[in-house]
Image: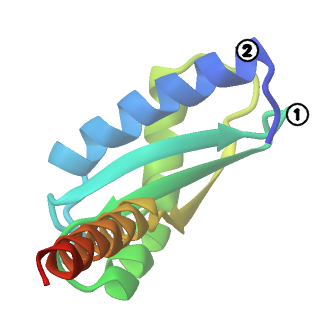
Amino acid sequence: MSTYPRTKRIGEEIKKVVSRLLLEGIKDPRVSTLVSVTDVDVTSDLKYAYIYVSVLSGDKESTLKGLKSASGFIRREVGKNIKLRYTPEIIFKLDESIEKGLYMSNLIKNLNIKKEDDENE
């Protein structure tokens, strides 16, 4: 998205509010407490906020559906806590960077083990 300082600040504030709501505010059983907000991108016109979440346990698709159904409540809470002229529309996206990082780490680890085995032979 954009790299304006104001949109970054607003994104960080939205991240704080949504993280707090994930811990104590959302009562949807599809959304577990092991969901974390990894990043928030706010468009330069402040109309949309893309919230990237990482699901650590449970079904990712049902968690995303639960978050999408609670997006109206989350948008209202963001509007109450952050004073903006227009409250951005909340759009949740699944962030799979943690899984990709673990996968890459395992690949590197396996290569190092294979390299050590080749040197010992």
At mark 1, the secondary structure is loop
Any mark on residue 37, and which? none
Q: Earlier in the sequence, mark 2 or mark 1?
A: 2
Pointers 2 and 1 in contact (C-beta within 8 Å): no
Any mark on residue 45, and which? 1
Q: Camera-side residue: 42 or 115?
A: 115
Residue farthest to the front? 121
Image quarter of residue 20:
top left
Residue 62 rendering spot, x and y as whole percentages: 34, 86
Residue 74 rendering spot, x and y as whole percentages: 44, 49
Q: Is residue 103 left or right of residue 86?
A: left
Q: Is residue 5 visible?
A: yes
At mark 2, the secondary structure is helix
Q: Camera-side residue: 75 or 49?
A: 49
Q: Residue at x 49, y 70 (%)?
A: 68
Q: CA distance from mark 2 to mark 1?
A: 11 Å
Q: Is residue 25 visible?
A: no
* Three-letter code, disc 1: Asp
Q: Residue at x 44, y 34 (%)?
A: 15
Question: Nearer the viewer's eye, disc 2 or disc 1?
Answer: 2
Image: 50 above or below 83: below
Q: Camera-side residue: 27 or 106?
A: 106
- Badge 1: few (under 14), some or many (20 or more) residues near its Cα, within 10 Å? few
* Three-letter code, disc 2: Arg
Q: Residue at x 66, y 41 (%)?
A: 41
Q: Camera-side residue: 64 or 118?
A: 118
- Badge 2: few (under 14), some or many (20 or more) residues near its Cα, within 10 Å? few
For disc 2, the marked residue is 6
Q: Is residue 106 left or right of residue 89?
A: left
In the picture, the quarter occupied by the C terminus is: bottom left
Residue 25 rendering spot, x and y as whole percentages: 23, 47
Residue 27 rendering spot, x and y as whole percentages: 19, 62
